Image (cartoon, coloured by chain):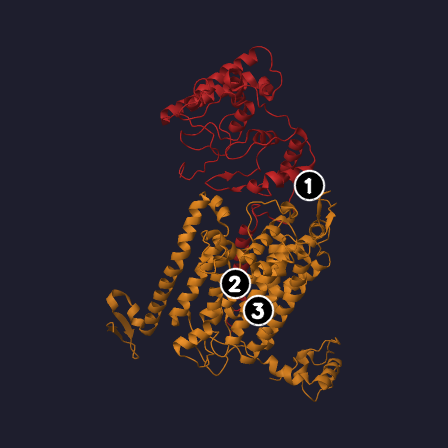
């Protein structure tokens, strides 16, 4: 049931205007064309939104141009043509690149349909497209802060664990499996998010999640620990979704008790007299 | 029954093993006594065991698979004792803080309790430690489930009736001991999840009117969290409760032995006999096979499926919580009861005592239901005015009220158990927790009633069908009957 059963996972996320399927198909097609163009033209300019000095010259200009186009196609109907917001979406003035990048990277934006809450999914825009939109928005109204954070590739795991259990585990679970946090909100699983986006989430505080002010060493430790949870082998056999006794109980009941009943029926079949 | 040696074994010397082999007991007198005979004879002259063994080996076991459920519970318990003994070699029942310095990097250098540290060492450093821990945990989960299924078989077939009421009560005592073992064992690793569970238990005890605080202090040794709790739980888990369990089990089995087995109707079975193969050789081989198959299945679960990864929960820190937080499923009904109960705290007028909200769902209602089940043999005898001895079992449909009540109570506990995982199920079914909770709240009231009525009706229909087989015939109650001479005739519905 598309739409009906979706959780609202972020309240501050806006919605685009209504689009007919035809219009969406047109947009989809043109997006593909732009994607192809972008892939050819802007590959050297990918690092532009990572806070580094943008590449000089035509690359940057073209990225901004395509960003403007993509913004109009994907964002403007709700957020307004200058990011001023509207009845369907909040203002993007001054939200900063970290926010834009996070929302698009995690697939929450752009919405598939207006009035549909954003939720964690595979991003619908390519990296080049996302970067183009971010560059355009930052240039025109979104402002430079908060910037997309630089995250050290390694950190103190023990400190990361401590920060995680104190700040994150209450919603995302000790193993990062996510969980329900009431009122239809769901803390998404952290198994497929990269370090930069984790850091962005702590800075931005998307949806019901609060924003945190971790200094760089703590941020590095935290992202290192979550990356450890994602990648480190967890011994003991098949991990049952990392959500503890509920799936364990089902396994015990179905495989354990069920298996033993089968065994009992087999061993206890009537003795030929 | 005297057993003869197989002809091809006549001139072979028996294995001079010192173990008394029951096979040698019925040997022909005129043969040259073997080494084995001498050893067995030596014991027999001093204990007189042969007479008893001869009777015991001929004991008859009814032939139905459901009679093996109790045995499987016993075998799970044996696996629990074996793996648990291994675990005690490495476990340290001490809440004193120590620094973890093992191979699990995120906790290395972290201050944890000695208990948690030892469980980490058991899981990562002790050879086969993790698989032993996991087999132990899975065996505990399966143990309780098998006990419940065994009890359900006894209940629905009326096996608890006179003269077996006492054993029914002992069985319930064993179930409570098993639950106690589960809860104390679940808490021993002193990880974040089990600490949360203890916190809830502490609050539930605290919520018992009048005596709650004193009782909680008595059990926990002060205000939660207490330093002494882990060692107390350990003594309960490895000495007191298993001691009582073994004693209770022995009594349970001895009474079964003395009162003899019940059996299903049919064939040559009557109230005065027991029909089935004897202990030797059939039942012995069945039981030995069953033990190994049970152990194999538990080892399979322990080896294949991760359970309670304590490293991922980390040590218990009183001010930290994690989600989702559930107890093991066998106390899930209690968790569910607390999650479903409305915030209702009645104040007793005049004395002005407030009944805490945990008491009614967490103590009173389950107390009444367990009480009803335990007293069922006596209540049934009273209300049906049937105080005779019963050794032949009922089929469930032959006692509609009993069957309907049993299923209604099972439905109640099932809904509570599922509700204990409402947040996990909400994510799984892509629903709001609040919606699911409301559904469970309604189901908790409605489903047992519906179950009762449906089960009752089904039983009555089945009885009718059994009494008048023709009534089940199709085509408006017309049935064909074959006469003794081979002809066919139409039979109208009676």
B246 up-or-down from A76: above or below:
below
| Mark 2, residue position | A261
Residue displayed at 72% across by 50% down: B121
Chain holding disc 1 = B
x and y, in percent, of residue B421 in the image: 50, 50
Local secondary structure at mark 3: helix
x and y, in percent, of residue B210 in the image: 54, 61
B410 or B378, which is in the foreground?
Answer: B378
Tell which residue pokes out farthest to the top in this image.
A57
B374 or B214, which is in the foreground?
Answer: B214
| Chain letter for the part of the structure drawn in red | A
Chain holding disc 2 = A
| Mark 1, residue position | B106
| Chain letter for the part of the structure drawn in orange | B
User: Does mark 1 fall on the same chain as mark 3?
Assistant: yes
Residue displayed at 59% across by 52% down: B199
| Mark 3, residue position | B71
A57 up-or-down from B337: above or below:
above
A82 up-or-down from B77: above or below:
above
Measure the alpha-carbon separation of dots 2 and 1.
41 Å
């Amino acid at each position: 049931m598309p739409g009906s059963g979706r959780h609202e996972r972020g309240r501050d996320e806006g919605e685009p205007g209504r689009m007919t399927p035809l219009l969406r198909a047109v947009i989809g097609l043109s997006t593909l064309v732009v994607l192809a163009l972008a892939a050819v033209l802007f590959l050297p300019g990918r690092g532009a939104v990572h806070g580094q000095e943008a590449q000089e010259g035509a690359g940057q200009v073209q990225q901004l141009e395509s960003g403007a186009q993509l913004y109009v196609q994907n964002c403007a109907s709700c957020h307004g043509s200058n990011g001023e917001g509207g009845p369907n979406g909040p203002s993007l003035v001054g939200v900063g690149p970290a926010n834009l990048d996070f929302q698009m990277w995690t697939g929450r934006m752009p919405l598939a349909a207006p009035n549909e809450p954003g939720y964690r999914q595979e991003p619908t825009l390519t990296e080049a497209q996302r970067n183009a939109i971010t560059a355009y928005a930052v240039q025109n109204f979104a402002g430079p802060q908060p910037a997309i954070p630089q995250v050290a590739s390694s950190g103190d795991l023990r400190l990361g664990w401590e920060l995680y259990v104190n700040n994150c585990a209450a919603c995302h679970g000790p193993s990062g499996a996510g969980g329900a946090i009431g009122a239809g909100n769901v803390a998404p699983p952290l198994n497929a998010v990269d370090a930069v986006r984790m850091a962005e989430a702590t800075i931005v505080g998307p949806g019901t999640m609060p924003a945190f002010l971790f200094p760089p060493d703590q941020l590095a430790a935290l992202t290192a620990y979550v990356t450890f949870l994602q990648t480190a082998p967890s011994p003991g056999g098949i991990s049952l979704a990392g959500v503890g006794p509920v799936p364990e109980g089902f396994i015990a009941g179905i495989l354990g008790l069920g298996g033993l009943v089968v065994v009992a029926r087999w061993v206890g079949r009537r003795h030929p007299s | 029954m005297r057993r003869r040696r197989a002809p091809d074994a006549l001139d072979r010397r028996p294995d001079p093993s010192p173990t008394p082999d029951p096979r040698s007991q019925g040997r022909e007198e005129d043969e040259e006594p073997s080494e084995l005979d001498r050893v067995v004879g030596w014991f027999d002259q001093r204990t007189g065991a042969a007479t008893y063994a001869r009777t015991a080996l001929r004991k008859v076991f009814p032939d139905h698979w459901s009679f093996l459920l109790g045995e499987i519970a016993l075998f799970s318990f044996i696996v629990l004792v074996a793996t648990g003994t291994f675990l005690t070699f490495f476990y340290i029942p001490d809440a004193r803080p120590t620094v973890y310095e093992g191979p699990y990097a995120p906790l290395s250098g972290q201050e944890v309790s000695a208990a948690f540290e030892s469980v980490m060492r058991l899981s990562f450093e002790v050879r086969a430690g993790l698989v032993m821990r996991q087999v132990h945990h899975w065996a505990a989960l399966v143990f309780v489930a098998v006990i419940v299924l065994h009890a359900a078989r006894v209940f629905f077939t009326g096996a608890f009736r006179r003269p077996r009421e006492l054993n029914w009560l002992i069985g319930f005592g064993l179930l409570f001991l098993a639950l106690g073992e589960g809860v104390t064992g679940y808490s021993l690793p002193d990880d974040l999840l089990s600490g949360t569970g203890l916190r809830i238990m502490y609050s539930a005890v605290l919520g018992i009117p009048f005596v709650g605080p004193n009782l909680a202090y008595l059990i926990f040794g002060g205000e939660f969290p207490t330093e002494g709790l882990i060692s107390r739980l350990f003594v309960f888990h490895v000495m007191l409760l298993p001691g009582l369990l073994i004693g209770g089990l022995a009594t349970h089995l001895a009474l079964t032995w003395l009162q003899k087995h019940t059996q299903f109707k049919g064939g040559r079975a009557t109230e005065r006999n027991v029909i089935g193969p004897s202990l030797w050789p059939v039942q012995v081989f069945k039981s030995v096979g069953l033990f190994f198959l049970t152990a194999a299945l538990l080892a399979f679960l322990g080896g294949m499926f991760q359970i309670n990864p304590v490293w991922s929960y980390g040590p218990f820190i009183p001010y930290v919580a994690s989600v989702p937080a559930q107890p093991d499923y066998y106390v899930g009904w209690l968790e569910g009861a607390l999650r479903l109960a409305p915030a209702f705290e009645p104040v007793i007028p005049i004395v002005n005592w407030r009944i805490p909200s945990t008491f009614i769902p967490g103590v009173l209602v389950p107390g009444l239901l367990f009480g009803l089940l335990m007293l069922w043999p006596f209540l049934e005898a009273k209300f049906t005015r049937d105080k005779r001895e019963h050794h032949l079992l009922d089929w469930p449909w032959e006692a509609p009220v009993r069957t309907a009540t049993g299923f209604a109570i099972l439905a109640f506990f099932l809904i509570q158990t599922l509700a204990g995982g409402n947040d996990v199920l909400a994510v799984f079914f892509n629903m709001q927790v609040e919606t699911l909770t409301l559904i469970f709240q309604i189901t908790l009231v409605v489903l047992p009633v519906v179950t009762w009525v449906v089960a009752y009706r089904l039983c009555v229909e089945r009885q009718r069908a059994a009494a008048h087989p023709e009534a089940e015939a199709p085509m408006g109650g017309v049935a064909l009957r074959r006469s003794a001479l081979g002809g066919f005739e139409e039979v109208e519905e009676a």
